[in-house]
Image (cartoon, rainbow, N blue to C red):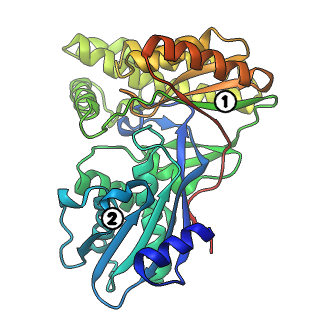
Amino acid sequence: MNNLLNKFEKVFNKGNGSIYFAPGRVNLIGEHTDYNGGNVFPCALTFGTYAIASKRNDRKVRLYSENFEKLGVLEFSLDDLVYNKKIDWANYPKGVIWAFENNGYKINQGLDILYRGDIPNGAGLSSSASIEVLTGVILKDLFNLDVSMIDIVKFSKLAENKFIGVNCGIMDQFAIGMGKENCAILLDTNTLKYDYAPVKLDNASIVIANTNKRRGLADSKYNERRAECEKALEELKSKLQINSLGELTEEEFEKNSSLIDSDIRRKRAKHAVYENRRTLKAVEALKNNDIKTFGRLMNDSHISLRDDYEVTGLELDTLVDLAWNQKGVIGSRMTGAGFGGCTVSIVENDSIDDFIKNVGDKYKEKIGYEATFYVAKIGDGARKIK
């Protein structure tokens, strides 16, 4: 904290900024269901993004990130809330200010904000959503805005969708804003109804493995998969009274899958339907303290993401295959959008050191560069610290 405060003073030539934090997130199960009206099961992590912020007396916003020091201080005016490629990552906070303004909240003074993230950029642990929700918390606090955390979550998603141009669902922002220590969130993305479920792993822990293959979400096949699911839904609606793929059971899908006039779209929709049901079963297993069933459903999730949704790739598949063959691994799958990023595994505590060494060595041998491992703890959502 002292280092951050000193840096803030040095960069902006002033002190007395307030300190804020927003976590990263990992999704335990329920992938690519959030924009298909299904359920997800993410949790907030204890590492994430810190910020120090204070108001200015003009309409200038100045932003600095310790993660992108070479870019220096990036500036824009509150009178120019349009996307600008030149200001790089600063478009994320800019988009959140734009979303607040679009929803009737007046940001009438400029800001100085220093950010520092502990989330690896491009790892699929939601560094961008962490910055967005963090910026929303800063705006609420500094301008005394009567805005709920759910609204901050919605505005952050709006910024990502309409300002940045990434067609994401709401899971990332929701988990980061609404996270709770030692709990994951069962979120129905269709209704935003949610329930906290304690994550009791007894003698096991969550281990995140970063492939260290960067994946640009906006440039990936994410939007293509989303369009394929939307088209499949339209085809199913020719007969069924549904508003999302998440409303279907496995049996209903199989009975009506012939309405989808493409093998590819049928596979995409199958993943969305089955993954949604897997998520509900996994949460039930966790509530019953049946961690083995939870792990098996994680494995099934990865197989579906690999074969039906085709969003894994060599690096993620290698990490998961290696994990499945390690002693003490209860379950392992890719997490996030795919095409790189991270895997999440549940590993017995006695086996964690061997897991990291063995999987790490074999991954480097096969892929040619190292993976990075984090033993993760589940923490609270975005908040003001000081």
Q: Amino acid at mark 1?
A: Glu
Mark nearest the camera among 2 and 1 is: 2
Disc on res. 284: 1
Residue at the spot 53% in from the left edge and 11% down from the top edge? 321
Q: Secondary structure at mark 2?
A: loop
- Residue 209 position within the rendered picture, expressed as x and y whole percent measured from the top left: 55, 29
* Nearer to me, 378 or 113: 113
Residue at the spot 31% in from the left edge and 71% down from the top edge? 103
Question: Is any atom of residue 19 visible in this view?
Answer: no
- Residue 40 position within the rendered picture, expressed as x and y whole percent measured from the top left: 50, 37
Q: Secondary structure at mark 1?
A: helix
- What separation in Å lies between label 2 and label 1 (alpha carbons)? 48 Å
Residue at the spot 21% in from the left edge and 28% down from the top edge? 231
Image quarter for residue 315? top left
Q: Which residue is mark 2?
A: 72
Q: In this rendering, is residue 149 above or below 374? A: below
For residue 353, side relative to residue 340 (left or right): right
For residue 259, side relative to residue 289 (left or right): left
Q: Amino acid at mark 2?
A: Gly
Q: In this rendering, is residue 371 above or below 57? A: above
- Residue 141 position within the rendered picture, expressed as x and y whole percent measured from the top left: 50, 78
Q: In this rendering, is residue 1 above or below 22? A: below
Image quarter for residue 105? bottom left
Question: Is any atom of residue 359 visible in this view?
Answer: yes
* Nearer to me, 114 or 175: 114
**Outermost residue to the top:** 325
